[in-house]
Every structure is written in C-alpha cells, then in structure tokens.
Image (tube, helix red, strand yellow):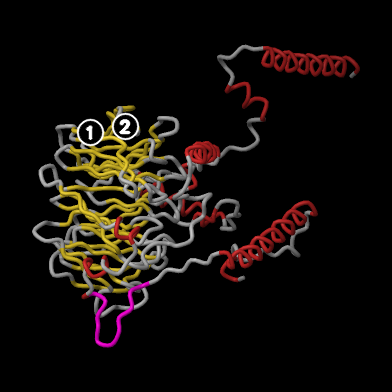
C-alpha cells in the first residue's frame, strides 16, 4: 500500500482546534481507503507490457521491422505503415492524449488530421506557406498551427477559428491540458501563455536568450522547459517573470528535450553529439551517451523507453535512466532521409517518425501503457463521452498560479520564518528588476481603520451603502461633539 499513499500524514495530536482535528482525521481516513481500494483494483489490471526477448547469442537491436511484421497479428501489422509525402516535407506530427487521432504538418504548408487506426480522414489543408509546428489542443476537435508569421487555430473540419496575432514567428507549440494553456516560443525569444478557454493572454516573458526552437512540458507539474543556443535549459512558470531553474546541460546548442511522465528524469540532446540523462529532483547528470551524429529529436514512452533520432537512424534505449546501457534495445534505419521528429503513441507499442519523405509508424514492443484510466484518456471514447469529458475538464480547469516545481504546495502551510520570507521576496525582486535596488515596504500601523480604507477606495462611487456609512460617520461625530459640549458646561 505504500506506493499508493498520498504523502506523509500530519501530526494530528498537536492540533488544538477540534474542527480542524476532525477534518484532518476524516482526510487521513479517506486517503487510507483510497490506497486500499487501489491495491484491490490491481487485480483488474490484467494487461502487461511485453518486450522483445533474445535467445542465445541474438541481440534485440538486430531485429528489423520486417521480421517483427512477419510474427505479429494482423491488427498490429495494420499499425505499421509509411506515408510517402516527399514533396512538402520534412514532417512533424502530434498524437492526441488518447492516442487515437494524429496531426501531421509539412514544412511547406501541408496539414492533415486523421484517425490513424482506421484511416478515416478528418481534414486536409494546403496553406502554401511555411509551417513550423502543429499541436492538438484539449481534444481532436481543435488544433493549433505555427505558420510563417502568425499562429492559427483550426477546428476538426479545417475551418479557421482564430488568428493569434500576438504570437508571431513561432517555432514551437505546447498545450497544457489541465490548465487549457497554449504555450509558444519563437524567433524573438518571447515565451507566451494563451488561455484557450477564455481567449485571454495569461503571461508573456522575454527569455533574453535569443531565438529558441526547443520546448517541452513537464507532464507532472506543467513546467515548461526551454533549450537554448548557449547550451542551457531553463524552467518556466507563468507566475514568474524569470526562470525557476537554469541548468547548463551542454557545451553546444540544445537540439531536443524529453521528460518522462513521472517528471523525474529529463533527456537532452545537443550539437556536441551528446545525449544526457538528468535527475530533475537533484538537477544532476545521471548518464551520458555519445551519438554518431547530433540527435535531432528525443521521446520518452509511457513505460520509460527513450527514442533517439539522429540522421536516418533511430535508437531505442531500455532502462536508460537506471544505469548506463552498453547497447540499445532496438534500432531502425529510415533509408535516404533525415529524421526530424520521433514520438511514442500513447497506449500503443508504436513509435511515429516524421522525416523528409513523410511519416512512418513502427512497432516498439513494450513502449505503451497497457492499462488506461478511462476518466483520464480513453482510446475508445464515444462522441457523447468526449463532450462530457470536455465539460468536466473545463469545470475542473486549474489556474496558472498552480504551476510550480512542487505541485503539492497547494493546501500546505508555509512554516518559513519572517526573515526567510523577506529574503525570498528580495531575491525575486532583484531577479525581475536587475537594475533597481530593493527597498522593503514600510507599513504604518494604527493610522487607517478598515472603514477609512473602504471610504478611500470608494472615492468616485456613490451608492446607498456609501451614503449610509457616511451618515453613520456624521452621527457619531455629532454625538461626540454634543457629549464634549455638555461635559465642558458641567465643569
């Protein structure tokens, strides 16, 4: 039951308030019941991930896709295909959260959406201008495209819904599904957050590190990781105008970043032909791999497999975060083309490859999560279930202020002393205003009552409430003057 426990229980005995103490006991009891039910429900998770197993002197990385295709069932064979699109490439692509629909985008303006399992086409566009990136939004009904100058949002039929004129020359797009935030970064180096549910621009920050074309989100806490040309990786939150963390990861520009689903590990690739594994809890380097040529794209599967695309090759590493591996788990060659994007499909043992000649789908046994939570992402959801989930997601939308390195801070008590809090405020001010000197705010006490503060704020507002308050104020002063007058006469 320990793996299902939700943190350590607080010291309930030291709480004096009976109401708070009762609520804490009730909360602890619910957590124990949830952990117990999770252990019981493990019996229902009958599916297990299977990996390639070599016999004798065989090596798994020598197995080709042709050999695998001859030994799998017909449904798996149908998932192995190539789309020959050699005129409008190179192609980038994106899967929906449930892994059922795909969005492909060619650099020369070709956009297409389709259900890749049954081949049903959603829409197809020929924009006749440069397309740098494309991203699904909360589900398959909307997607964003970073075009030559502006960023556009389209619906599932290909109709243009919005033109985001504040997001210019965008290179990379990311979407935070729990916050309904579209995040962009471009040639100018401005990181911008756009709320797709209300249309408001939540935040925009100048990274001050120049052009950026490497961005990925941490699925655990919603933090945005940016890779820059000076070899640094910066971690950003919409509530801070400066990076939360700044790491020097490579001695050359960053090419690609990938983060696992748990938010524990980060893989980075640089132009120095190095692929490094980092622990995001300690910000220390764990492993260091050398690739024959600089890696162009990285991806981490739901089960922890790492895909590295370099040149026409793709290497898949197993247990790369635990210890340094001597040889890859699998390897694939896409002849006479250069790999641009690699990405694992959710809940499927499929790896997608976007390259100069179109798109390829290959089988990687053991990469997908076999057991899915239908309330989180359902590969078999109906139209009615999709609509209900969309409403629930909007009602349960998280505010941008909840994005932090430690998302468990919500509901906790900051027990830091006053000096530590003042020092944190000073450091935050100096980071946001490097050319200004921090001056602590001096608070004068005893000179303003709550009533006077209210009246000052309502200077230009005249309503019944204010008239009554002013009348009460006048009556009080009159009674005081009358009392003092009679007191003076009596003496």
Tag 2: Cα neighbours inside 10 Å, few (<14), some, or many (≥20)? some
Q: Position of residue 144 (x, y in %)?
A: 31, 37
Please tell me whether mark 2 sits on a helix, a strand or a loop: strand
Nearest to the observer: residue 347 or residue 210: 347
Q: Quadrant of residue 258?
A: bottom left
Point out the residue furthest to the right here: 490
- Provide the residue span drawn in magenta: 51-61
Q: Is residue 481 above or below residue 233?
A: above
Query: Which residue is located at x 23 percent, y 32 percent?
Result: 150
Q: Residue at x 61, y 12 (%)?
A: 462
Closest to the observer, 180 or 489: 180
Which quadrant of the figure contains the C terminus? top right
| Nearer the camera: disc 2 or disc 1 | 1
> Where 101 falls versus 479 (above or below)?
below
Residue 470: image x %, image y %? 70, 15
Relative to 151, 293 lies left or right: left
Magenta-drawn stretch contains 25: no
Q: Is residue 35 left or right of residue 299?
A: right
In the displayed structure, does residue 426 sit left or right of residue 319? right
Q: Which residue is mark 2?
A: 154
Q: Are marks 2 and 1 in contact (CB under 8 Å)?
A: yes
Which residue is drawn at the image coordinates 31% and 42% (left, top)?
Answer: 114
Q: Which residue is mark 1?
A: 125
């Amino acid at each position: 039951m320990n793996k299902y426990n939700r943190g350590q229980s607080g010291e309930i005995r030291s709480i004096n308030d009976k109401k708070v103490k009762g609520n804490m006991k009730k909360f602890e009891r619910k957590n124990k019941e949830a952990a117990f039910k999770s252990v019981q429900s493990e019996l229902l998770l009958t599916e297990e991930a299977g990996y390639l197993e070599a016999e004798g002197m065989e090596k798994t990385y020598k197995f080709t896709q042709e050999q695998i295709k001859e030994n799998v069932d017909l449904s798996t064979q149908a998932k192995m295909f190539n789309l020959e699109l050699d005129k409008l490439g190179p192609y980038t692509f994106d899967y929906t959260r449930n892994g059922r629909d795909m969005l492909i985008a060619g650099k020369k303006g070709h956009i297409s959406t389709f259900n890749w399992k049954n081949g049903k086409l959603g829409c197809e566009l020929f924009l006749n201008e440069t397309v740098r990136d494309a991203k699904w939004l909360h589900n398959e009904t909307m997607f964003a495209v970073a075009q030559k100058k502006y960023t556009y949002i389209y619906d599932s039929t290909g109709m243009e819904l919005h033109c985001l004129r504040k997001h210019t020359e965008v290179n990379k797009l990311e979407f935070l599904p729990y916050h309904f935030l579209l995040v962009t970064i471009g040639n100018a180096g401005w990181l911008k957050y756009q709320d797709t549910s209300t249309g408001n621009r939540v935040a925009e920050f100048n990274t001050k590190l120049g052009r950026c074309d490497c961005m990925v989100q941490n699925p655990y806490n919603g933090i945005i990781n940016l890779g820059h040309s000076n070899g640094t990786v910066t971690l950003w939150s919409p509530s801070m105008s400066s990076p939360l963390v700044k790491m020097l990861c490579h001695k050359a520009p960053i090419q690609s970043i990938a983060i696992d689903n748990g938010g524990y590990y980060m893989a980075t690739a640089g132009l120095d032909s190095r692929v490094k594994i980092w622990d995001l809890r300690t910000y220390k380097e764990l492993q260091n791999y050398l690739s024959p040529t600089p890696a162009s794209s990285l991806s981490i599967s739901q089960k922890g497999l790492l895909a590295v695309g370099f040149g026409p090759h793709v290497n898949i590493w197993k247990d790369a975060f635990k210890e340094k591996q001597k040889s890859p788990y699998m390897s694939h060659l896409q002849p006479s083309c250069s790999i641009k994007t690699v990405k694992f499909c959710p809940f499927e043992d499929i790896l997608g490859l976007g390259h100069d000649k179109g798109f390829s789908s290959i089988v990687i046994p053991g990469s997908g999560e076999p057991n899915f939570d239908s309330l989180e992402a359902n590969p078999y959801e109906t139209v009615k279930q999709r609509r209900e989930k969309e409403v629930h997601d909007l009602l349960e939308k998280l505010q941008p202020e909840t994005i932090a390195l430690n998302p468990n801070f919500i509901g906790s008590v900051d027990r830091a002393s006053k000096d530590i809090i003042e020092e944190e405020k000073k450091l935050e001010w100096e980071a946001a205003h490097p050319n200004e000197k921090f001056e602590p705010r001096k608070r004068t006490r005893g000179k303003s009552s709550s009533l006077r503060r209210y009246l000052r704020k309502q200077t230009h507002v005249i309503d019944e409430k204010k008239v009554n308050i002013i009348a009460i104020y006048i009556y009080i002063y009159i009674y005081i003057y009358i009392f003092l007058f009679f007191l003076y006469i009596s003496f």
